[in-house]
Amino acid sequence: MQEILYLEIPTPDTAAVYNWLQTDFEPGTGEKVLTPQGFRLRVSDTTTSLGTISEKLPSELSVFVWSVQRTTYLKAFRWADKPLHREQQILKRLTTGIRSRFPYEYPEPPMLDLCEQSIFEALAPYYPLTVQYFQKMPKGEYDLKRVYWWEQRWREGVRNPQQPRQVVFSHVGGTREQGEAIPSSPTPPLSPSSSYDLIYIGGALGVIHAAVMARLGYRVLLMERLPFGRMNREWNISRDEIQSLLNLGLLTITEVESIIAREYKDGFNKFFDANNPSKLKAPVLHTPTVLNVALDSEKLLQMCGQKLRAAGGDICDETEFIRADIYNSQVVVTVKDLTSQTQKQVSGRVLVDAMGTASPIAWQLNGGRAFDSVCPTVGAVIEGGFEPGVWDSQYGDVLYSHGDTSRGRQLIWELFPGANEELTIYLFHYHEVNPKNPGSLLEMYEDFFTILPEYRRCELDKLVWKKPTFGYIPGHFSVGSRDRTVAFDRLIAIGDAASLQSPLVFTGFGSLVRNLERLTTLLDTALKHDLLSFRHLNQIRAFQNNIAVTWMFSKGMMVPTGKFIPPQRINSMLNNFFGLLVDEPLEVADNFIKDRFDWLTFNRLALKAARNNPALLLWIWELAGAKDLLRWTRNYFDFSRHALISALLSGWFPRFLRRIQPWLESRYPALWLRLLAISYALTTGIARPHTSATKVTSEVSLQKPKVI
């Protein structure tokens, strides 16, 4: 028996596929014998296309379907030593018929009028399991409204990228280097109620950076659309990365230990390989120091909020951003108080956009290329209810798949232990931004509640649900360090709104924390010298050349909209590469996943992957296309150029810059900011600490406690 066909059929209605196979499909030859899962096709000819069939085997094809991951799969096996008569025509007819009868579908969430019914009543006919289990969560109705709002906001941005909603208006005279992307406005400003140095919009990542800047003496205002401190996602990190919060004096060692909910022993990375050839199967990759520290995110936010207020800063929650008017000497921000439905204005020297993928500012600044990819991510924090032995809380799943592509997506799980018996579980996929197929949180949640028992043995009704976790995690395929606009006059973006993070496992939180000293020092320098125009602020970014070159890795994990690929293809590529990391020293895997690899390591691993599977290049070509491969080539040359410059300068340039700081900064502040940004760019992301030219570090170090 030999497998001759394997298809993913993008529908959860496996019964409909059974019926079509048994009733409607006409193979054009042979006798069709129905079976419980499909049919057998008896070929009456006594010869194959290549010769006589073995007497030991019947001349039959066996076709059957099954369901997993809320998707239907089909396989065909040949019961013969050689191809049967007209075998290829039969398989082509079968494939063509299935693709015609069961095409990709991209359902739209319904338009709702919540004045007439609750969110539960409105969505129950479309997403029954999602409604059922959100009703079991403490603030499920509020959170499901948030899921719906976030999806609608994301779809609006994806479908109108060339004409995004205008929220930033310039009243600055003269010609701007970034062109005319920001329109002027005749609307005169109201009298701002108060004035600040920094105004942050977005209270999750925003409060961390805001607290650091407030402690440096700046007048800071933080505004958040939600009640302050409420999170849609949990955060995981490692001890060496959270060190930056200590270096900047934001937290003490005791405070850091108090926000660690759990530190697990090991993290697993494993991808489904049952349908892969033996050379593309891989053992579990162990990464014990990747995302192994689970933080109490809400406690961290509250702690940063307290420090922000203690340093003289203000927080306004349940406040929605409306627009920003930029003038020569200030930015005026118009917001709406959601509790009173009244508008007000505040002014500041700089506006910081920390609104994430929902940011209308990010869409406006970058027009048709606000984001090139996205990870629609859903999940939940579960307090208990798993049977003993289902999971050991000393371990985490960093990246895991339990099946092949599902309805045009390679679904991937993450699992992180939290405090007590809590488990935070995520389901996501890498997705190419497409107006026809923006990516749906609601569809993903229906998947999540359907297939969670396939991933980890459980009875959903016995689980104790604490809260949902969800969001759109963006990606931008930067060709160079200036490819993405993260700033305007008196405006700068951080976190997911800047979209400069890793395509592997890190979100805007990881990017912000790893680059916190860099972003803080550069912004502090710009504020001190009033270098607040676009050309200065656009240098303050968390860009890394090594991250830019790995976007092809995430591109190889996306199924282009409307395109069918072999279901096992993405798992094959993942196993190919992660299998190489298994054979490397632990430090190599750790640095790669934490975006700290250098040029030599990248090239060595890429060549090994190509040698192990020469078809890899063709697979990437099929998924990425010529245009994106050309863009990646530019990435690679930029990465190589940067690696050469870094090799020549990084050993001495940061120290030299620190020595000439007193003379250079006072005389040529713009040049000083530029050179300081270059200094950080030389050393960030290659596992080499930066010798900061500005004294912001403290003499403390967070080490893992010794076990006695």
Image (spheres, rainbow, N blue to C red):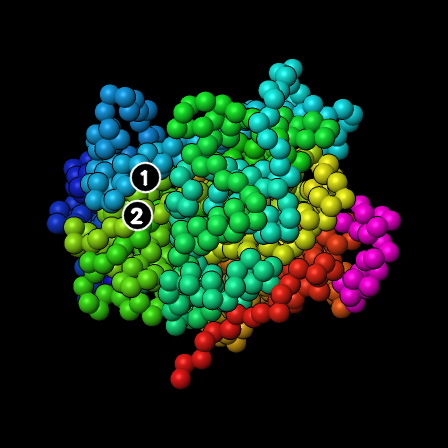
Q: Quadrant of the N terminus?
A: bottom left
* Foreground residue among 394 and 261: 261
Question: How many numbered circles are shown?
Answer: 2
Q: Left or right: 584 with respect to 79?
A: right
Start-end of magenta stretch: 652-673
Query: For residue 601, what is the image quadrant?
Result: bottom right
| Residue 455 on the magenta span | no
Quadrant where the C terminus lies? bottom left
Q: Which residue is mark 2?
A: 467
Q: x%, y% of residue 310?
A: 53, 49
Specify the farthest residue to the bottom: 708
Q: Position of residue 614 (x, y in %)?
A: 53, 62
Label 2 to label 1, Cα distance in Å?
8 Å
Helix, strand or loop at mark 2: strand
Image: 231 above or below 681 = above
Callout 2 environment at 10 Å: few (<14), some (14 to 19), or many (20+)?
A: many
213 above or below 124? below
Residue 143's disc number: 1
Q: Between residues 273 and 490, which one lies in front from this camera angle?
A: 490
Name which residue type carries label 1: Asp
Mark 2 or mark 1: whose residue is earlier in sequence = 1
The prevailing secondary structure element of the residues shown in magenta is: helix
Residue at 68%, 31% (x, y): give it: 330
Which residue is pictured at 59% across the width and 31% down the height?
A: 194
Q: Quadrant of residue 246?
A: bottom right
Can the viewer see residue 179 in this picture? no
In this view of the protein, can residue 34 be seen by the observer?
yes
Is 663 left or right of 269, judged from the image as shown? Answer: right
**Proximity of marks 2 and 1: CB atoms separated by less than 8 Å:** yes
In this picture, residue 416 sits left or right of residue 196: left
